[in-house]
């Protein structure tokens, strides 16, 4: 990923986080739909997760990380966390928290950004609106510190 793209992601995430820090006016929209509902619910999120898995499997930056994984287990956990993080009330995440799940994996910035790219590409494949993609990006960015080993620097990021 080019540094220009990283800067764009960073700026978008900061903007979204700044916007989300203000309390929403729920009096005007008492039945506002969750992000999960706006995305399309269970079947749509399952389809997006399937494409995320396929994107990871083809991505030269991260495909080796997933090569020895059980696809059905990973997709189930990714579906659960994606659903819960976007506001599903009918799904329970049964996996570990992000810090525990990625402990000792030594994931670097480039790998994290490749995963983000794969997720957003899957969202685009399913014609997810830009606002919803931005919200997914903000969620991903919010767990970055629990996933990335900040002590690892790659040449690609420095150049």
Image (tube, rainbow, N blue to C red):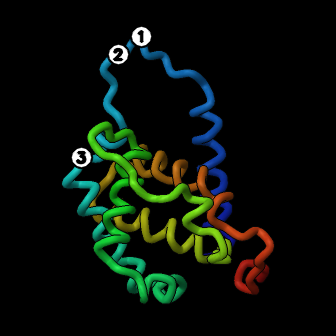
Cα separation, mark 1 vs mark 3, equals 24 Å
Please, is residue 4 above or below residue 99 in the view?
A: below
Q: Is residue 31 above or below residue 122?
A: above
10 Å crowding of disc 2: few (<14), some (14-19), many (20+): few
* Residue 8 in view in this figure: no
What residue would you read off at disc 2?
30
Residue at image mark 3: 40
Tell me the CA gap for discs 2 and 1. 6 Å
Q: Earlier in the sequence, mark 2 or mark 3?
A: 2
Residue at image location 19% in from the left, 54% down from the top:
43
Extreme residue in the top direction = 27
Q: Which residue is mark 1?
A: 27
- Quarter that holds the N terminus: bottom right
Q: How many marks?
A: 3
Distance from the alpha carbon under mark 2 to that under mark 3:
20 Å
Note whether 130 is above or below 75 in the view shown: above
Q: Residue at x 64, y 69 (%)?
A: 103
Instruction: Tell me if mark 1 has few (under 14), some (14-19) or many (20+) residues whose alpha carbon lies within 10 angstroms of its own.
Output: few
The reply to whether callout 2 and callout 1 are in contact (CB within 8 Å) is: yes
* Residue at the (33%, 71%) spot, across then down: 73
Name which of mark 1 and mark 3 comes first in the sequence. 1
Q: Residue visible at 80% across and 73% down?
A: 151
The residue closer to the viewer here, 156 or 76, is 76
Residue 157 occupies quadrant:
bottom right
């Amino acid at each position: 990923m080019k540094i220009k793209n990283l800067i764009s992601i960073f700026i978008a995430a900061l903007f979204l986080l700044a916007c989300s820090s203000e309390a929403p006016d729920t009096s005007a929209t008492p039945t506002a739909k969750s992000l999960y509902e706006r995305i399309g619910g269970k079947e749509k999120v399952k389809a997006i997760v399937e494409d995320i898995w396929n994107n990871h499997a083809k991505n030269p930056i991260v495909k080796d990380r997933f090569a020895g994984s059980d696809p059905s287990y990973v997709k189930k956990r990714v579906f659960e966390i994606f659903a819960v993080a976007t506001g599903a009330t009918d799904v329970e995440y049964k996996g570990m928290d992000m810090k525990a799940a990625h402990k000792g994996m030594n994931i670097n910035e480039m790998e994290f950004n490749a995963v983000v790219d794969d997720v957003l590409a899957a969202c685009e494949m399913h014609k997810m609106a830009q606002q919803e993609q931005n919200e997914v990006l903000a969620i991903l960015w919010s767990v970055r510190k629990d996933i990335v080993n900040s002590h690892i620097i790659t040449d690609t990021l420095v150049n």
